[in-house]
């Protein structure tokens, strides 16, 4: 038996440090009992997101649709088109009415501001399960 517990890595993108912190606090160390612990990678620029995803090892991406100058919805679409085996994406949107834009972005999940910690944790947990199932299916 290994002494190290498995983890999954969540990338959190926002130009707003407070938004990144809200996501981290909502998800916590483990968003659900059936999932491994999480590690966070926080980034504040479009270039940093692409660089980190190109390096691999990201299981879920949480992108702030309200980030400037590069919003998370456009970034999500870019990721899905350009990153091989891109992780599932949660986009944080400004208003519930913007959910259709998240569909255009090819994000698997959306949560609207103001962020509800339970909704964020639930969405991330669902995406972690999808990623685990996808990785298991391709192994």
Image (cartoon, rainbow, N blue to C red):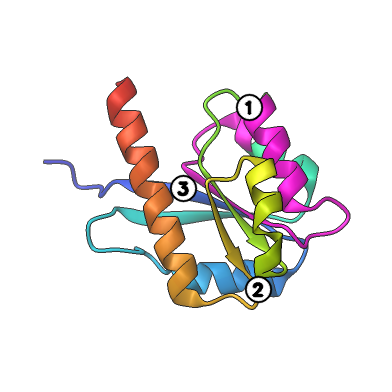
Q: Which x, y percent locates residue 72?
A: 72, 51
What residue is drawn where x is 88% and y is 54%?
A: 69
Q: Relative to the observer, which residue lies in front, 95 or 37?
A: 95
Q: Which residue is mark 1?
A: 83
Disc 1, SS: loop
Q: Which mark is residue 9?
A: 3
Q: Earlier in the sequence, mark 1 or mark 2?
A: 1
Position above or below: 88 against 97: above
Q: Which x, y percent locates residue 7?
A: 35, 48
Report the number of discs: 3
Task: Using a 10 Å C-alpha cutoff, classify the residue at mark 3 as few (fewer than 14 neighbours), some (14 to 19) or many (20 or more).
Answer: some
Position above or below: 9 against 137: below
Which of label 3 and label 1 is nearer to you? 1
Task: Give the residues in magenta.
Answer: 53-81
Q: Residue furthest right?
A: 69
Q: Residue furthest left?
A: 1
Q: Are marks 1 and 2 in contact (CB under 8 Å)?
A: no
Position above or below: 137 against 8: above
Q: Which mark is residue 71?
A: none
Is 34 covered by the magenta stretch?
no
Q: Which x, y percent locates residue 46?
A: 78, 45
Task: Using a 10 Å C-alpha cutoff, classify the residue at mark 2 as few (fewer than 14 neighbours), some (14 to 19) or many (20 or more).
Answer: some
Q: Earlier in the sequence, mark 3 or mark 1?
A: 3
Is residue 94 shown left or right of residue 133? right
Quarter location, residue 44: bottom right
For marks 1 and 2, give the CA distance: 27 Å
What residue is drawn where x is 63% and y is 66%?
A: 20
For marks 3 and 1, give the CA distance: 16 Å
Q: Which x, y percent locates residue 41?
A: 57, 52
Disc 2, SS: loop
Q: Which mark is residue 113?
A: 2
């Amino acid at each position: 038996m290994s002494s190290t517990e498995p983890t999954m890595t969540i990338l959190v993108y926002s130009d707003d440090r407070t938004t990144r912190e809200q996501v981290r606090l909502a998800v916590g160390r483990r968003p659900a009992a059936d999932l491994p612990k999480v590690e966070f990678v926080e980034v504040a620029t479009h270039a940093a997101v692409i660089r980190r995803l190109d390096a691999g090892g990201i299981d879920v991406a949480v992108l702030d649709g309200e980030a400037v100058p590069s919003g998370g919805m456009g970034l999500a679409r870019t990721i899905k088109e350009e990153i091989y085996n891109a992780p599932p994406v949660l986009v944080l949107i400004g208003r519930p009415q913007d959910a259709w834009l998240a569909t255009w972005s090819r994000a698997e999940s959306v949560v609207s501001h103001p962020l509800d910690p339970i909704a964020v944790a639930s969405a991330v947990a669902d995406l972690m399960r999808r990623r685990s199932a996808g990785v298991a299916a391709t192994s």
